[in-house]
Amino acid sequence: MRPLDRPFTMGQLLTLQPENVTVLIYGKRYDIPIPISEHQLLTAIAQDEIVLLPVNFERTRLLLDIPETSPHLERELNDFADSDESVTDLLKEGV
């Protein structure tokens, strides 16, 4: 697993193509290249209404190997959701 050496942000999955994914970050679209292994994973989860993906700060690659227990991940999800209840708690409840 790669260590997080820089901050990251969350992007909303817009479209999935064989070689890239388009995400929306703060109202701007970014096309990010993906390997076949990530395409297979994203195909499985793209069925959901809203899919949030961790993206590196430069918006050039996905960071799909961030541990669920990362405090930075929880902060980013909570900022995106703008909720008083922890997103981690909501995910555990299956919301």
Image (tube, rainbow, N blue to C red):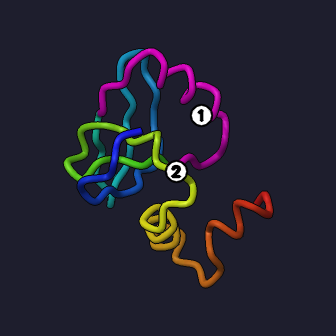
What is the x, y in percent for residue 74? 51, 67
Q: Residues within 10 Å of mark 2 (few under 14, many from 20)?
A: few
The residue indicated by pointer 2 is 67
Q: Position of residue 40 (x, y in %)?
A: 55, 20
Q: Is residue 51 above or below residue 8?
A: above
80, above or below 57, in the image: below
**Closer to the camera: disc 2 or disc 1?**
2
Residue at the far right: name it.
93
Say which of 29 and 79 sits in front. Answer: 79
Cα–Cα gap, marks 2 and 1: 20 Å
The disc labelled 1 sits on which kind of residue? Ala
Q: Secondary structure at mark 1?
A: loop
Q: Quadrant of the C terminus?
A: bottom right
**Residue range corresponding to the magenta coloring:** 32-52
Q: Residue at x 28, y 60 (%)?
A: 7
Left/right of residue 70 with respect to residue 94 in the rendered view: left
Residue at the extreme bottom of the image, as rendered: 84
> What residue is shown at x 25% (from left), y 53% (from top)?
5
Callout 1: 10 Å neighbours few (<14), some, many (20+)?
some
- Residue 94 position, x and y percent, is 78, 57
* First in residue order: circle 2 vs circle 1: 1
Residue 69 appears at what percent x and percent y? 56, 60
**Magenta region includes residue 17:** no
Q: Which residue is mark 1?
A: 46
Tell me the quarter of the picture where residue 90 sits.
bottom right
Q: Residue 35 lies in magenta, yes or no? A: yes
User: Residue 31, labelled with which disc?
Assistant: none
